[in-house]
Amino acid sequence: MFIIYDLIFLIFMLVYLPVYLFRGKFHRGFSRRLGILPPDLNLDRPIWVHAVSVGEAIAIKALVSELRKAYPHKKLVISTVTATGNRVAEGLIKPGDFLTYLPLDLSFITGPVLKRINPCLFIIAETEIWPNLISSLYKQNIPVVTVNGRISDGSYSGYRLIKLFIRPILNKFRRFCVQSATDALRLQELGVDKEKIHTTGNVKFDMDLEVLAGLDPSDYRRKLWLELENKLLVCGSTHAGEEEQLIKVYKELLLSFPKLKLLIAPRHPERSKDIAEVAAKNGFMPLFISSISSACPACVSASVFILDVMGELLHFYASADIVFVGGSLVKTGGHNILEPAGLKKPIIFGPHMFNFRDITEMFLQNKAGIMVADTAQLKVEIRKLLENGLLAKALGERAYELISKNSGATMKNIGIIKGLKLI
C-alpha cells in the first residue's frame, strides 16, 4: 500500500514542480525536506514539535514553554512546512534545539530522517496526516500526539471517502487532543479508538494577556502620524478579492468620517504591491509601512496604509479602533480572531469562517464579535461602531472576557503528554 502511496506522491511532486518553481518555494531550507541534515547533529532523544505554518507556529508558543518546564533536560526539534512559519518558529528556538522543515512524506526520506533525529515524542499542532512519517514513527515506537486537533468540514468530507485507508493510520497516533466535541465525534466516526481522544479546547485561547496588555499602541499610532481625533480601521490577514471590497467600503465611510484611516495587512505580504494598485485605482495613494520613517510628510495626508512586513500585525491590532479579520469575505475560511479579542478590540468578520467554526460560534453566541453577510452590512456595522464608542467598547470587553474564560487547553495537553512513557 505504501509503495503505491510513494509512487502517487512522487508523481504529484513531479507534476507540481513547475508550480513550486514559479512560486519560489525552493528556499534555502528545502534540502531539509529532502532529508539532508547537518552531519554533526546530536540531539539525544529530543521532543519534536511540528507546526505547519505561521498560525500553528504562533499557537504552540505556550505549549513549547510548558514542555521546557515539564522536560527541562530535553532538547526540542521544531519543524514547519512553510518558510514564513519557519521564520516565526525561530523565536521559539533556544541553544541546542534544532529548527528544520518537515521531510517530504516519502518512505525513503522519512525513515532515515527519524533515525538521525531519533525523537522520544512527536507532537503535531492541529491535524496533519502524513502516512509514511506516522508509520515510521509507529514502527520505532515513538508516540505521536496531536494537540489543538480539528477536523474541518472539508477535511472530514475528504477523509470519509478514504476511511478504509486512513483509519489504520489514525490509530497509530497515541493521543488526539482536540478543540471541540465536534472534532472528537468526527475522529470516532473515522474509526479512531475513543480512549485515544481527549477534548481539551483550543490552545489559541492560551495567550499571555499580560503581554498583550503591555503593548503600547501610542508608538504605532505615532508611526502612522495619527492624531487623537483619528480612528484606525485595521483589516488583518486579507486575501485576493477581499481588499478591493474593503477599500470601496472605506471610501464610502470616508464621506461621513473624514478622520478615519485604513490599514490593510494582507495574509501574504508579497501581495502588497497588488493591493497598492487596487487602492490607486480607487483614488488613494497608499503608503507601505516599510517605507515610513520618523520624518514622513506623506503620512499626514495619507489615509490608506499597507502592512508589507511580517511580525507587526499584533502591534497594529493594539493600535486599532476597529478590527476586521480577513479571509472571511472570500471563501478562504477566515483567520484568527483571538488576538484582537485579547486586546479588547471590537471585531468584525465575514460569513466564511469555516476554518474557525467553533470559535466563531462561541463569539456570536456571546455577542463578542460581529459577522456580516456582505460589504453592505460591513459598512453599516462599522458605521455603528464609529458612531457609538460605548457599543464598540462593550463588544471588545465581551471578546476579552471570552478569552479569559476559555484558556487552559495548553495545560490540559501537557497533562496528557506527561501521562505517556517517553523512552
Image (cartoon, grey):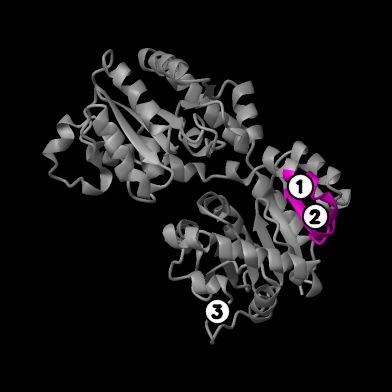
Decide: few, some or many residues near mark 1? Use Cα within 10 Å; few <14, some 14-19, many ≥20: some
Q: Name which of mark 1 and mark 2 comes first in the sequence.
A: 1
Residues under labels 1 and 2: Cα distance?
7 Å
- Above or below, comparing residue 109 to residue 130 in the picture: below
Which residue is the site of mark 2? Answer: 166
Residue 321 in view? no
Question: Mark 1–mark 2 contact, CB under 8 Å?
Answer: yes
Residues under labels 2 and 3: Cα distance?
28 Å
Question: What residue is drawn where x is 20% and y is 32%?
Answer: 302
Q: Amino acid at mark 1?
A: Tyr
Question: What residue is drawn where x is 40% and y is 17%?
Answer: 379
> Is 274 inside the magenta-drawn segment?
no
Q: Name which of mark 2 and mark 3 comes first in the sequence.
A: 3
Which residue is the site of mark 1? Answer: 159
Decide: few, some or many residues near mark 2? Use Cα within 10 Å; few <14, some 14-19, many ≥20: some
Q: Name which of mark 3 and mark 1 comes first in the sequence.
A: 3
- What x and y, as percent, mark residue 254? 27, 19
Q: Secondary structure at mark 3?
A: loop
- Above or below, comparing residue 415 to residue 120 in the picture: above
Q: Secondary structure at mark 1?
A: helix
Residue 289 in view? yes
**What secondary structure is the magenta-colored segment mainly?**
helix
Q: Is residue 191 left or right of residue 377?
A: right
Q: Is residue 34 left or right of residue 415?
A: left
Residues under labels 3 and 1: Cα distance?
31 Å
Question: Mark 2–mark 3 contact, CB under 8 Å?
Answer: no
Q: Which residues are magenta?
A: 158-177
Which residue is the site of mark 3? Answer: 36
Decide: few, some or many residues near mark 3? Use Cα within 10 Å; few <14, some 14-19, many ≥20: some
